[in-house]
Each structure stands twice: as C-alpha cells, then as structure tokens.
Image: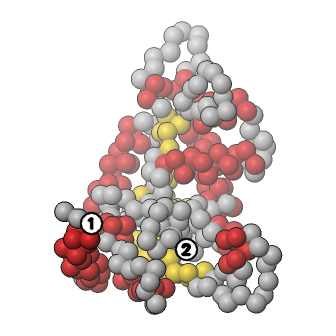
Amino acid sequence: MPPDTMVEVFAPARRALPEFASRKQRERAGNGGLAFERFGGNWSKKDYAIEAIKRDWVRAIEGEHGDCGELARYAERIEALAKACATKPLRFTTKWRLVVGMGIANPLENGLTWHRTLAAPYLPGSGVKGLVKAYVEEWADPGVSDVDIRRIFGSTPRDEKDFVAGSVVFHDATPTTPVKIVADVMTPHQTAYYRDGTMPRDTEDPTPIVFAAVQEATFQFALTPACRYVNFAPGAGKIDPLERALGDCESTGKWLEKALELLGAGAKTKSGYGRMKPT
C-alpha cells in the first residue's frame, strides 16, 4: 500500500485514539501511563495552536493514577522480599512536586516515567542508585573511601578490569497509594540562547512549556544485599560477607534519606522539585 494511501486509511484511527484516551482518563479508566506515552501526538508542526493542544493533553491526565489495591499488594510483596533479605523498606513522601523521566522521548517534549503494570509514576532503581552515589561522592560527611564506594555500588565504566557488582541492590521506588498528577509550566525567557547558543537578550518573548508533574505521593524504597551474599556461608575465622552487606544496606539507607532531603530526585531539583521526607 502506498504511503499516502496508508496515511489516508489510518487517519480516522489517528484522530480517534487520542480522543478515546482522553475520555478514558477523564473517567479514570485504563492505564494512564499508556495513554500518556502512546496516544498523544495528535498534532503537527503546522497546527497553529499546538501549545494549547499540548496543554489540553496534559490537563487530560490530571488527577490520581494507580489502583489502591494493586499498589498495596505490590508494596506488600516488596516488603516481604526485603524481610526475607533481613532488611526493611523505607518510605518517603514528597515535600513538593516531583518530575522523573523528563528527558524521555514524548510528543510533549517532556516525558514522565510510568510503571508499566502499576500505571503510576515511579523512580527506577538505577536512578535511586545514581542519586545516592552522587550524594556519597560529593556530600557525605565524613567522606566515604573509594574502596567502600566500589564495594557498595560496584565498578564504574572507567574501570578497565576486575569488574564487580555492588553489595547493595537498589529496587525501584514505587508509590504506595495513588499518585496525584498536575499540569505544571516552565517559561524559558531566552529560548535562542538555550537552543542555538546565541547571545541572551531580553527582547525575546517567553515560551510557556506545559509538562506533567507529580503533586504528592509516598514512595517505598527497598535496599537488599546482593544474592551472592545472601546465599554465602562463611568459613571459620572469615568476615561474614552477608553481615557486611547488611551493614552496607543500613548505611546506604541513611545516605538515601540525606540525598532525598538535600539533593532531591528526578529533574528540576534546583527549583525545589524532588525533595522528600521520611514517612
């Protein structure tokens, strides 16, 4: 089928899907993350009111996302996993707004990280690990030795040999209750400077950009020792690797609390986003 014919054939579906997704979001039915990531983009650069269309699309997903029962059951499973590894999960509540995954490709140009099955925003374990490591390397007092950092977080890409995994496993931080999402806005004043590197000036018109942000949520974090330590049986007179790994988990939990309070998770942390407090 020629490309032009395909466009003509699928045009009704292209228009119907976003309308269907928007209606489902208003009814709070279906997976909000799927709608946000896949059913947007019903516009083109030729649309005169493209920014207004994007704004309406973000506002269509405003409200609470995630099923109470599913979120609670998932939290219970992670809690049982942590307990089996002789640790316990940590819960933190946002102090203000949170934006995770802003750089993800999206028709809105500003994405949001959604859990595929829980249908709610979450913090990937890799991001949690990076946040804690950044805090340890730059802010921890007293300083943590390079040997301890390598043992806890594992090798870095700069290591040429002797690659090792860290002693602590960073699990995804998932919400324990439905997450409230709002339409937020940022207004760059020197667009040409950021886009083209030209000299900044005050004669440009501000460009409001709408994006989706988490208004309030409580997340459950879990830190467990790596499996090789859980299944390890130490010999007589040797240091117990499991005991040391559990100590690493305890230290990492304290660093995580400080990192969330001082640095914040996700994007726009310099503007106060992403800060959390223990629950």
Residue under the image location 26 percent in, 80 percent down = 15
Q: Is residue 41 depicted above or below 155 in this figure?
A: below
Quadrant of the frame with the N terminus? bottom left
Q: Nearer the viewer, residue 228 or 100?
A: 100
Q: Position of residue 182 (x, y in %)?
A: 46, 80
Q: Element type at marker 1?
A: helix
Q: Is residue 168 depicted above or below 10 in this figure?
A: above
Which residue appears farthest toward the top when viewing the image?
Answer: 236
Q: Is residue 20 visible?
A: no
Splitting the image into 4 quarters, where does residue 220 fall?
A: bottom left
Instruction: Check disc 1: other Cα within 10 Å, few if <14, some if 14-19, many if 20+.
Output: few
Q: Position of residue 118 (x, y in %)?
A: 32, 60
Q: Nearer the viewer, residue 242 or 149?
A: 149
Q: Which residue is mark 1?
A: 3
Query: Nearer the viewer's eye, disc 2 or disc 1?
Result: 1
Residue under the image location 63 percent in, 34 percent down = 156
Q: Nearer the viewer, residue 77 or 206?
A: 206
Splitting the image into 4 quarters, where does residue 167 fall?
A: top right
Disc ID at residue 97: 2
Q: Amino acid at mark 2?
A: Arg
Q: How many marks?
A: 2
Whether residue 36 sits left or right of residue 224 in the image: it is left
Q: Position of residue 206 (x, y in %)?
A: 66, 87
Residue under the image location 31 percent in, 72 percent down = 39
Whether residue 211 sits left or right of residue 42 in the image: it is right
Q: Nearer the viewer, residue 119 or 44?
A: 44
Q: Amino acid at mark 1?
A: Pro
